[in-house]
Structures are given as structure tokens and as C-alpha cells.
Amino acid sequence: LGYKLLSREVFSLQPSLLNLRAEEGRNQSAETERERERERERERERERERETMLFFSYFKDLVGQEVTVELKNDLAIRGTLHSVDQYLNIKLENTRVVDQDKYPHMLSVRNCFIRGSVVRYVQLPPDGVDVDLLHDAARREARGG
Amino acid sequence: MGTLRSFDQFANAVLEGACERVIVGEQYCDIPLGLYVIRGENVVLIGEMDTEREELPPHMIRVSETEIKRAQKVEREAGELRGTMRKRMEFLDFD
């Protein structure tokens, strides 16, 4: 039983700002509206960047552990986590395919690079994860750091 | 398969002496392609092949290109048939 982390971006819901200024809004110029919209966009960009950093940092701490990477094409690969980058591309060492008979393509492959965009799950050993710490960190990120 | 000559931040890659290994069931075929530039968007995995290890299980049979293309077509059609049968079953279930 391993914990599976979704490598998709976690989209956080922006807390809806009670726009009590709706009434006044009509009086305000369109210019400032656009400015505020731009500012909100920038905030969301920073938000998304910070979210990528959380799992990037998390995987950096996991380097050296045995993991199983399940891809979107259903291929599952077991190996030692060698490195990870900002796109969550993964480099595995000592690779072996989980169902070797079904996927004979990679029999001689021992080290591989996996593009982050094709990963569905990264399966970790249950004792390799501090779930509460991760949960807290994720909650903090979602709230805005 | 081939010799990785270069790559970039998008995982675009240049493969020299590239050949496409198509595997259908127990049959396989290597189709030579020459020099390939691959768009990173399509890359799933880049694996380093250990020369000291066997590339394929010993029981696999090497066939010609026409043979493997035919096998691929059969497999694809079987997959599609399974898909349509399933949709018909699911449709019935919703009654």
C-alpha cells in the first residue's frame, strides 16, 4: 500500500472577496478595475509558482528512496529517485518495469528520464511520507503562504 | 531507439541512427528512421539502454515491417470493437 500523490497542479480556490464595493463600483473608473484585475492575476501567478515549489521541494527530500512511477499510459516503473526538477520531471535509477511481460520494451533500460507531464502517480513507501506535515504545508500554500 | 545527440529544457531531442521498435504481442520489428528531431511535447520517457543487458525477452519473434503493420491494424481494430461493444453494454445498463 503506497500513498499516491497526484502530480497535477493543485488549483486553489481564491477566497471570494465580498465585493461590498459593488455599489460604489459603478462610480469607480474602469481604469482602476483593470489595475486591480491585473494585480489579482499576478497574485494567482505567484500562487501557482509557489504550489509547484512545494512538491518540487518535497521530491527533493525524497531523493534516494524507492518509488514506483505510474504513467498516464498505464506503464508503471519502479526505481530509485535520482533527481527531480521544477517541471517535476523525474530521473530514476536502477529501473525495472512493474509488469515486465506486458511491457517488454524497456528490458535493458536501467536509468531513465521521465517527463513530468506524463506522470499520473508517484507511489511512495508509506513510512517514507509524513502525511501530516505535507497536509499542513499544502493547506498553508492554498491559503497563500 | 537511437543515439541521443542533444536535448533542451522542453525535452525536445535529437536522435541519430533512430529506429522505431514496434511490438505487437510476441512479434517485433525495427524500422530504421535515420536522424530524428523529436518534439518534447510527445516525449513520455527517455531510457538509457544498458548494452550488457538483453534488449528483449528471448521468446520474441522478429518479423517484417508489413507483417508488424498488419498485426498493429488487427490489434487496433480489436480494441475498437471492444470499445463499441462496451458502449452498447453501458447503454443497456442505463435503462
Image (cartoon, rainbow, N blue to C red):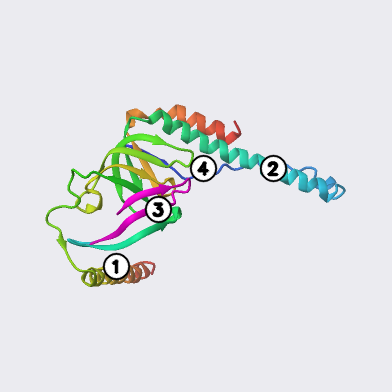
Check disc 3 and report the residue beneath it: B14
Check disc 2 and report the residue beneath it: A40
Q: Main secondary structure of the magenta part?
A: strand
Q: Chain of mark 4?
A: A
In the rendered view, tell whether residue A55 sits above or below residue B19: above
Give the structural element (helix, strand or loop) at label 4: loop
In the drawing, what numbered circle is on residue A10? 4
Can the viewer see residue A1 in this picture?
A: no
Judged by depth in the image, the label closer to the viewer, 1 or 3, is 3
Q: Going 79% across and 47% down the picture, which residue do you hit? A: A33
Neighbourhood count class around disc 1 (C-alpha, 10 Å): few under 14, some 14–19, many 20 upward:
few
Q: Nearer the viewer, residue A21 or B31?
A: B31
Type of residue at label 3? Answer: Val
Is residue B69 found left or right of A52 in the rendered image? left
Q: Quadrant of the N terminus of chain B?
A: bottom left
Type of residue at label 2? Answer: Arg
The alpha-carbon separation of the residues under discs 4 and 3 comes to 33 Å
The magenta segment is B1-23
Query: Was residue B13 drawn as part of the magenta stretch in this picture?
Result: yes
